[in-house]
Image (cartoon, rainbow, N blue to C red):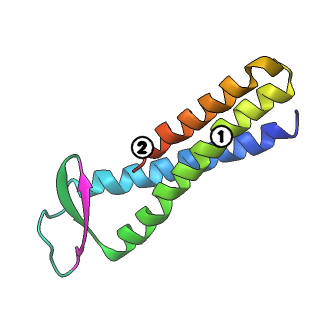
Amino acid sequence: MKWLKPFNFALVSIYMAAGYVSTSIERAALNQPTAPTELYKYPHEIKGVIRYFAPLQDYIHSIAKPTMFVSAIIIADIVIFGLWLANMIKEENLLIIFMCMLLINVFIWFCFR
């Protein structure tokens, strides 16, 4: 059980760092043009408005968003698996727990689409 804590801590750190990067890029995009220019070529929907990113912003954003998604799913799975290992989840509730884990993963996927 103790070996799960460093993994969870690392994943939460990765999630927060990717979230900070993604949020910073989206916040900067609020001041960027709504029509493509020579520098800003890559469209993204930010707060319901199409804003255009620079090439480096688009590249970093395309890495940060999936990183957040994957780390959030793995964090949820590790927490549920850790509770199961600690015998906080009884055998008869295991199917319910795994269905909840699936629903959490689907919810996270919809949040980061």
> Mark 2 to mark 1: distance in Å?
16 Å
From the viewer's perspective, tell me whether residue 22 is left or right of residue 94: left
Q: Is residue 40 above or below residue 87?
A: below
Residue found 68% across the figure and 32% down from its top: 98
Taking the image as drawn, is residue 33 in sight? yes
Residue found 42% across the figure and 54% down from its top: 22
**Residues packed near mark 2 inside 10 Å, few (<14), some (14 to 19) or many (20 plus):** few
Q: Please say whether residue 41 is one of the residues in the magenta stretch.
A: yes
Magenta part, dominant SS? strand
Mark 1 secondary-structure assignment? helix
Q: Please say whether residue 108 is one of the residues in the magenta stretch.
A: no
Q: Does label 2 or label 1 sit earlier along the sequence?
A: 1
Return the residue nearer the eye: 99 or 113: 99
Tell me whether the residue at label 2 lies in contact with that at label 1, contact meaning CB atoms closer than 8 angstroms: no
Residue on which disc 2 sits: 110
Where residue 23 sits: x, y (%)? 39, 49
In the rendered structure, find residue 75 and report the number of the disc placed on it.
1
Q: How many labels were placed on the picture?
A: 2
Residue type at mark 1 is Ile
Magenta extent: 39-46
From the viewer's perspective, tell me whether residue 10 is left or right of residue 113: right
Where residue 6 sits: x, y (%)? 79, 42
Residue type at mark 2 is Phe
Residue found 62% across the figure and 33% down from its top: 101
Quadrant location of the N terminus? top right
Residue found 72% across the figure and 40% down from its top: 8
Q: Is residue 86 above or below residue 73?
A: above
